[in-house]
Structures are given as C-alpha cells and as structure tokens.
Image (spheres, helix red, strand yellow):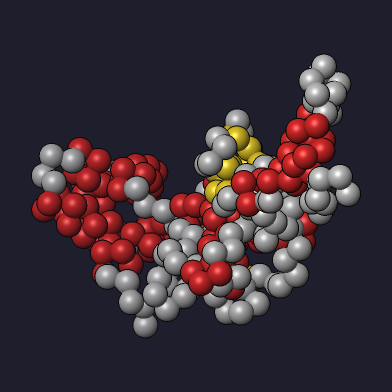
Amino acid sequence: MSDKPESELRLDALYAALRNGAAIDREAAFDAAMAELACHPGQAWARELAEASVSEAGEARLASATRAFLDACGCVPGFDQEPELLGGLEAALDAVRADLRATGVAGQVSLVIGPDWFPTNVVVETWKGDHGWTSGIFPSDAADDLSALVAVAEQVREAVMESLNYQFMGKVWPACPAHGVATTPMARRGGGVWWCDSGGHVAAKIGHWAQGHTRHDEPSPQQLPLSRRVVSRHMRSGSSPRSRGARAWPLIRYASSSPAGA
C-alpha cells in the first residue's frame, strides 16, 4: 500500500501510461485536470486535458494533452518508475569512491533507496551506518550525469563527515590541501568539482583527487609551528632570503630550535 496521496498516484499512472505507450485512463486524466482547475481555474493546459479526456478526437490528442499537463505540473518520475536513474547515481558514486581512496578513507559507502524519513529519495550509507543530515537525493537530482555527480558527492561528504566524528573531532572531508578546510561539491564549467569556499578555488575535480594528495586530518599552514611555516614558505616559492639578496639569518633564526652559538 503506497503512502502517496491519491493525486500523486494519478499523476504516476498517467506518466507510466505515456512511458509505456499504453492507453491513458481517461477517468484518471479527467480527475487530475479537474483537481488542478479547482485550484487554478485559468490553467489552459489543465482545461485542454479535461476536454481531451472526454473528447472523441482519439488517443493522440489525449496523449499530447497529458504530456503537456505533466510537464506544466513539474511531474518528475521517481526512482521506482525510472530504475535507470539509479544507474547514473551508481556511476557517480564510483567516481566519489575514488576520492575516498585517494584521501585515505578506507570505509565502504553504498546507496540506500527509500530511507524511512524520505521514502521517495536515495541516501548514501557509510561503513558506520551514517547517512548525513539532509533529505537525500531527489529523483530530479539524477536527471543528468552532472547533477547526479554533485548530488552524490554532497551526500557522501555529509555521511563520511558523520562517520569521522565531525561534530566532536572537527574532521572535515575532503579537506582542501592548500587551506586545510572543508570543500563542497558543485558544478563548474561543465564539470563537478570540490570547491574550497575559504580560498575561492577548485581543490580538485570530483573523482580525480590525486592519490596521496591530502589526508582528512592534514593541518592547514596556519596550524603549523612558526619555524615550519617559514621553511615551508621558502620551499614553496623556490627561493630563500639569500637568493633574493637579503640576509639569510632570519631563516636560520626561525628554522633552528638550537640555542644561539650551539
């Protein structure tokens, strides 16, 4: 027994008939149209469906009116109606799994269909049974490969951070290698990326985080001791105070922990 309201069940039935090329239930079409007109009397596409459902013009007009009605209502098929949508989510999850491995997270993640708190959606479950803190992935999120990739990456991010005890330990995933702060998935220039909000830059493409690029507990440069920051800064720039014509003693003074004259 479905928990969906009758109005949604009617729309599901109309969509299924269109998808399968089957005869459309005229009574269901008429009821759906009249329910819409009761709330919005001026909707021409609802009026057309009501008229087509009682007309003798044939199935072609009824099918066309039904399609226009569903489009206007923003009807999106669910995972139960379009199982192939799950294939796109699985492909996206494989890409994010590569980033988990590259950042040293060995636990397994998988898709769970129809969680108790949002039966029409899909969530990601980690090795600890965590699912993140949102409603999950909506069927509309799986409409294309890019939106599916970003949606799955966000769900993995939330669930993994829960399993890493983010609330208590402050561990983020995946951490920007340049700033040591959390990144978020987004669509950018036609692809999915991990975006560093702190630095305003792309940390990596989703699914292409370099092996060993960073660990989820890697400290940011600001968290390093002063001596390591000074040495690290000159190593990254490929220069030193001496190479720029400056005196070398500041580097020796801050980099060394031994007493003067030792």
- Measured as percent of width and height from the top left, residue 90 is found at 66, 61
- Measured as percent of width and height from the top left, residue 209 is found at 74, 48
Give the number of marks. 0
Compared across the picture, whether 56 is left or right of 130 comes to left
Question: Can you name the residue that lies furthest to the front here?
Answer: 261
Could you say which is closer to the camera, residue 137 or residue 169? Answer: 169
Could you say which is closer to the camera, residue 46 or residue 145? Answer: 145
Compared across the picture, whether 64 is left or right of 220 comes to left
In this rendering, is residue 228 above or below 191?
below
In this rendering, is residue 163 above or below 152?
below
Compared across the picture, whether 173 is left or right of 261 comes to left
Question: Can you name the residue that lies furthest to the right here?
Answer: 262
Residue displayed at 52% across by 41% down: 197
Which quarter of the rendering shows the N terminus? bottom left
Residue displayed at 73% across by 58% down: 215
In this rendering, is residue 137 above or below 2?
above
- Measured as percent of width and height from the top left, residue 210 is found at 79, 48
Note whether residue 182 is visible. yes
